[in-house]
Image: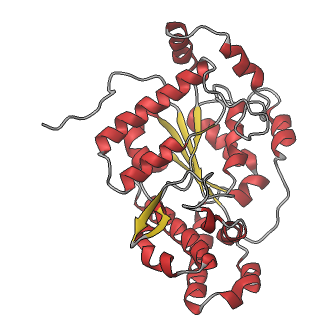
Amino acid sequence: MKVFLTRENQKLVDNVVFIDGFSSSGKALIAPIFGFLERGEQWQVDYFFEKLAVLSHLDKISKKNIKTVLEAKVDELVYNLFIGRNINFRKTDLSSPFFNGLEKKYLKRIRSKEKDPAMKRILQAKPILPIMVHYIYGCTDIFLKSLQGKLGLYIIMLRDPFHLINVWHKDKWVKKRGRSNREFHLCIKIKNKIIPWYAKEYSKDYIKANNLEKAILTVYHLYKRVFSMYKRSSSNEKKKILLVFFDEFIKYPDLYINKICKKLKTKKIKNFQKIIKKRLSLPRSHNDPITSIEIFKKKYSKKISKRYLDMLFELNENYIDFYRKKKLS
């Protein structure tokens, strides 16, 4: 007899927001905004969600069990936030309430009552819980399928892919995956080679590639999965998805923030515009082209084979097309 986990009669939070995207795509620019919205909580970074999504992607855990574990985890997170437990109080961390000027709110909660009184406060407050994850969308729709009623919004940050490739290569992330002790993303082993979990489908090419080519493959396939998954998403799923283009967001943040408020049925707090101007430098002037392919080619063309150049041209064309169709302005 098969036994599945369940949490069908229990619920604390029904406004979970996932903020997803590649490294340097702007997630840490939009995540703090939720702390300055009514009912918004301090944004969270928890690799647990990514690891669960990876297990699902690799078919190592059943969908029913994932659903229950996800539901339990988001409820646990919001309960801990409301009693001041496991709060990141490192003043220099981007995800700390000290960094975002919200420390008084959470220091006060440390002294508040827990258990039933905390439960009552949560149910009355109807909090919005923002959680940052890294490049999960496109590999699995597990969050959209599993959380459903609990999911308020799934934000996907998108940015010039050639900027992302350049940063990934310059910061030597290819070398860090599966090697650095401070690296907590999961890897897999194929033909005695350790590679990132997301390279499974193109492992043969990834293993053969040099470090620059590995960076190209990573971003190329990430965007390919994003475009593909968004296209096949149902109309109801798309209602929960917000595509945020970095270049457009920094110029016209209110276009996106107003949309977020409408979808989550919330409002900006008092002095919101002054806060984001001071803490996030928004809005900003920005007149760069949609992609930086020409700059990228000038810098790296002699190090890239025709095959990878063709891959870049394809990525450039697809990204610009997607941007023009989906941008808000």
Q: How many marks?
A: 0
Give the x, y percent position of residue 165: 66, 70
Query: Taking 8 as reference, is 96 left or right?
Result: right
Q: Position of residue 257 (x, y in %)?
A: 69, 42
Q: State the quadrant of the C terminus.
A: bottom right
Residue located at (70% from left, 72% from top): 291
Inspect this view and state whether residue 236 appears. no
Check the image and report above or below for 126 versus 221.
above
Nearest to the observer: residue 145 or residue 216: 216
Q: Residue at x 87, y 40 (%)?
A: 278
- Please identify the quarter of the rendering in which residue 160 is found: bottom right
Q: Looking at the rendering, which quadrant does residue 307 occupy?
A: bottom right
**In front: 107, or 175?**
175
Answer left or right for 3 relative to 160: left
**Residue 310 or residue 267, whichever sits in front:** 310
Residue 12, visible in the rendered structure: yes
Vertical side of 84 occupied by 63: above or below: below
Residue at 59% x, 7% y is 113
Where residue 71 appears, x then y in whole percent? 41, 32
Q: Position of residue 132 (x, y in %)?
A: 59, 44
Q: How is the image coloured?
A: secondary structure
What's the residue at 84%, 53% (across, down)? Answer: 284
Which quadrant, please, contains the N terminus?
top left
- Please give left or right for residue 273 compared with residue 50 in the image: right
Q: Nearer the viewer, residue 2 or 150?
A: 2
